[in-house]
Amino acid sequence: MQRRAFLRIVGAASLAPAGLDSPARATDASPAATVLYNDRSVVLDRVGRNPKQEADALWVRKRDLPRINDFELKPQGACRADLCIPIPKDMIRKDYFNLTAFAKKAGQPVVAEAGERVWSFGEMQALGSAFVNSRIAPDFAVPDRAGRPVHLSQFRGRKVLVVTWASW
């Protein structure tokens, strides 16, 4: 099955009427959306209006962000574990967050089928296993002022700034 066909099927399923006995869908003024991220499919019952009329922009509620991609908005930006990505003010509007702009800022591929109300987000390079594994520096030793060896592993669990210099 091609990705586009899959997106249409998932989008149609998420927008199907909930039934006559469910007034929540009938009175909901905001359109629903389905977000595909990693192995999850998150159905959002409310998304924000697009102020700039960008065709593929998806404005999600801030409180829905952890459900979608495990990120949480904090004063320092969108954070997940020890990774924080600074967020410009134009990506936040009251209770809503521009998820597609965030994905583009983080270098995450986005496939949008706005007419079907389905957005699919690829893997973030910053969260990939190679990047995460490479964030831990290999152990090495350098002499201190007295000539005794100091190993980087002695500082595990603490933040360390390593400054190198060469005279050539």
Image (cartoon, rainbow, N blue to C red):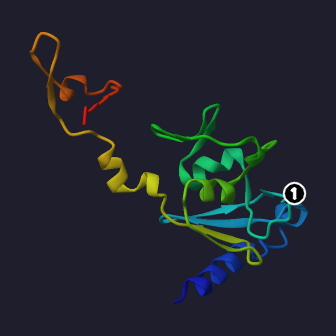
On screen, residue 151 versus residue 7, left or right, reads left
Please tell me how crowded label 1 is: few (under 14), some (14-19), or many (20+) other residues with Cα within 10 Å: few
- The residue lying at 74 percent from left, 69 percent from top is 56
Q: 142 above or below 59?
A: above
Locate the C terminus and report the quarter of the image it occupies: top left
Residue 48 image-quadrant placement: bottom right
- The residue lying at 76 percent from left, 65 percent from top is 32
- The residue lying at 65 percent from left, 31 percent from top is 75
- The residue lying at 36 percent from left, 52 percent from top is 131
Q: 150 above or below 40?
A: above
On screen, residue 49 versus residue 6, left or right, reads right
Residue extending farthest to the bottom is 1
Residue extending farthest to the front is 168
Total labels: the figure holds: 1
The residue singled out by tag 1 in the image is: 51
Viewer can see residue 96: no
Viewer can see residue 102: yes
Q: 84 above or below 132?
A: above
Residue kind at label 1, given as amino acid type:
Pro
Residue 95 image-quadrant placement: top right
Which of these two is toward me, 31 or 157?
157
| Rendered location of residue 135, percent (x, y) | 33, 43
| Rendered location of residue 37, percent (x, y) | 54, 63
